[in-house]
Amino acid sequence: MDDGRYKSDNNKESAVGEPVHSESSARKDERRYTYSDYLEWDDDQRWELVDGVPFLMSAPTWQHQKICSNLHYLLYGLLKGKPCDVYYSPFDVRLNADTFDNTVVQPDILVICDHTKLEKTGCKGAPDFVVEVLSPATSSWDRHRKFDLYRKAGVREYWIVEPDTKKVSAHILSGEDYITRIYGDTDVAPISALDNCEIDLAEVFLQE
């Protein structure tokens, strides 16, 4: 598993007095945490919980934050007056709240159209649209583990934004699988999950 943003040092103690486990050690550990445990952890630290295993998140880079800010601004304008709302991290998303309730993620950007999913602490269930902006530490995590989490939870569209190559991989849910479309920074990319919504990617990658 990648080092950096998702810290998995087994010697590091979590806010609940248990190790922050790596994926390899998770299979041997009998302890699994739930959303109720997650709510008791230190508010000064950011966590994600995947299949009961906690991962400590570090602060993103300014380039990452600039892209997130640009996307949020564009989506806010496009969705104003419509039933869908855009949010940004930190924002808890309980992907399996109706079953195990042991997976809580914090997407960089998300859009929710069904307001019954909103609760005081975030979203209960799958958002309609999710964006993750890659960093060297999270590339594999976002491309694989989160890809599978969002697909299985029924997220209708998942964008992976690559700051270095200025590309967007748009994964669109079709049945139980994602189909993928690739866009560059000169493209205007439609968001299939949202009606009459498209993004000028040149504005997303603008760093001024």
Image (cartoon, grey):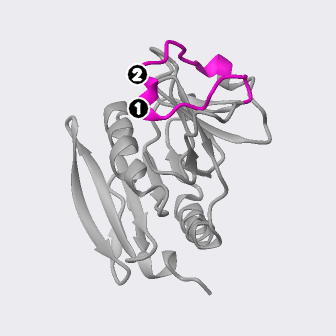
User: Alpha carbon of mark 2 to alpha carbon of mark 1: how far?
Assistant: 6 Å
* Badge 2 element: loop
How crowded is the residue under tag 1: few (<14 C-alpha within 10 Å), some, or many (20+)?
A: few
Residues at marks 2 and 1 touching, judged by CB atoms closer than 8 Å: yes
> Eyeballing the image, is 66 above or below 93?
below
Residue type indicated by callout 2 = Arg
Q: Name the residue at 75% across, 23% down.
A: 40
Q: Which residue is mark 1?
A: 24
Residue 103 in sight? yes
Mark drawn on residue 114:
none
Q: Name the residue at 65% across, 52% down.
A: 58
How crowded is the residue under tag 2: few (<14 C-alpha within 10 Å), some, or many (20+)?
A: few
Magenta span dominant secondary structure: loop
Q: Name the residue at 58% across, 83% down.
A: 207
- Please give left or right for residue 117 compared with residue 199 in the image: right
Question: How far across and how far down the image is residue 97, in percent?
Answer: 51, 21
Quarter of the N terminus within the rendering: top left
> Eyeballing the image, is 183 above or below 206?
above
Give the magenta part as a residue range.
15-37
Q: Which residue is mark 2?
A: 27
